[in-house]
């Protein structure tokens, strides 16, 4: 049973299927994406083959991508020993992984991490994984859920459960097809964008009100001090005048 058969948020007319690409008759689910991010003055332009695998949590990327994010995001954290590249073993293979200390690497840093944008020409849709989805929290560290296999320079990537949790993907085993409800995910992205914009407006209004209130308090303070000074001068003038008359009478 497909989602549109039991959930009215999904429409059959918006469901699109494309062929899955497999090699050597392996029952793998593969898609082709165009990865074209720009990190300041550094640009990667690659067409990548991506294997969708629920066996892993995050993303397995090629070494070129790891180098790019290290140079353009993690470099300053490496220099301060806040983050470091480590080696882990998984399914009899070795991978590079980036871990950061929670004492100095915070949620603010995670939010500033470059989102992973994967554009599918077949679906005409950009799949986006943000820092809050790509970092895993442990007891004392934040671990980037993007691995790079050591000694493996192929352009093939892997997308795991972090991708499947965010996007509704359908697998047609009988025909070797992958389906995706494009419109539903567009609506979700627009909602998130709308919420983000509304939050920014609320924060801006709040900051403006605080600024006006503080300005009013400062104005009242200055005005009050000015009146006190003027009143003090008047008292001083009266005192001097009275003293002079008293002297003349004497």
Image (spheres, helix red, strand yellow):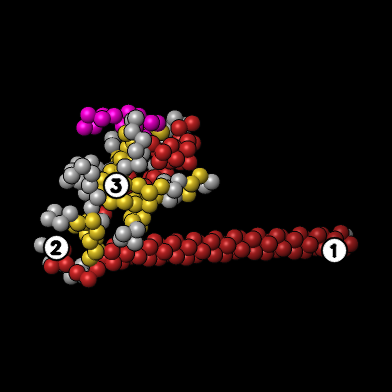
Q: Which residue is mark 3?
A: 50
Task: Tell me, yes or no, whether the two marked residues, 1 and 3, touch with CB atoms within 8 Å.
Answer: no
In x, y percent, where is residue 135?
33, 43
Determine whether the residue tagged by mark 1 lies in a helix, strand or loop: helix
Closest to the observer, 36 or 40: 36
Residue density around tag 3, few if under 14, some if 14–19, many if 20 or more, within 10 Å: many
Q: Quadrant of the C terminus?
A: bottom right
Q: Earlier in the sequence, mark 1 or mark 3?
A: 3
* Mark nearer the viewer, 2 or 1: 2
Regarding mark 3 in the picture, which secondary structure is present there? strand
Q: Residue beneath label 2, please?
A: 2
Q: Nearer the viewer, mark 2 or mark 3?
A: 3
Residue 90 among those drawn in magenta? yes
Q: Earlier in the sequence, mark 2 or mark 1?
A: 2
- Kindly identify the residue that appears in the image at 40 percent across and 31 percent down: 84
- Name the secondary structure under disc 2: loop
Q: Can you tell which quarter of the image residue 247 is in?
A: bottom right
Q: Nearer the viewer, residue 140 or 240?
A: 140
Q: Residue at x 38, y 49 (%)?
A: 47
Going by the picture, which residue comes out furthest to the front? 24
Q: Main secondary structure of the magenta part?
A: strand
Circle 1 residue: 245
Q: Which residues are magenta?
A: 84-98
Kindly report the distance in space between the C-alpha atoms of the residues bearing marks 2 and 1: 104 Å
Picture coordinates of residue 244 (x, y %)? 85, 61
């Amino acid at each position: 049973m497909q989602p549109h058969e039991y959930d009215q948020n999904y429409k059959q007319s918006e469901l699109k299927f494309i062929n899955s690409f497999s090699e050597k008759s392996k029952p793998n689910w593969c898609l082709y994406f165009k990865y074209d991010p720009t990190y300041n003055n550094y640009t990667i332009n690659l067409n990548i083959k991506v294997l969708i695998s629920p066996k892993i949590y995050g993303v397995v990327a090629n070494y070129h991508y790891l180098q790019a994010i290290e140079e353009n995001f993690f470099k300053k954290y490496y220099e301060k020993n806040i983050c470091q590249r480590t080696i882990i073993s998984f399914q009899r293979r070795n991978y590079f992984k980036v871990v950061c200390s929670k004492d100095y690497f915070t949620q603010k840093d995670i939010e500033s991490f470059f989102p992973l944008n994967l554009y599918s020409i077949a679906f005409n849709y950009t799949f986006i994984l943000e820092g809050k989805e790509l970092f895993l929290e442990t007891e004392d560290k934040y671990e980037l859920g993007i691995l790079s296999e050591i000694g493996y320079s192929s352009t093939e990537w892997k997308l795991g459960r972090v991708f499947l949790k965010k996007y509704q993907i359908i697998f047609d085993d009988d025909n070797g097809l992958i389906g995706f409800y494009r419109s539903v995910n567009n609506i979700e992205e627009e909602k998130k964008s709308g919420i983000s914009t509304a939050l920014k407006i609320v924060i801006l209004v709040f900051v403006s009100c605080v600024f006006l209130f503080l300005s009013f308090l400062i104005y009242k303070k200055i005005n009050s001090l000015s009146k006190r000074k003027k009143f003090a001068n008047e008292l001083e003038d009266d005192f001097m005048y009275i003293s002079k008359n008293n002297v003349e009478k004497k």
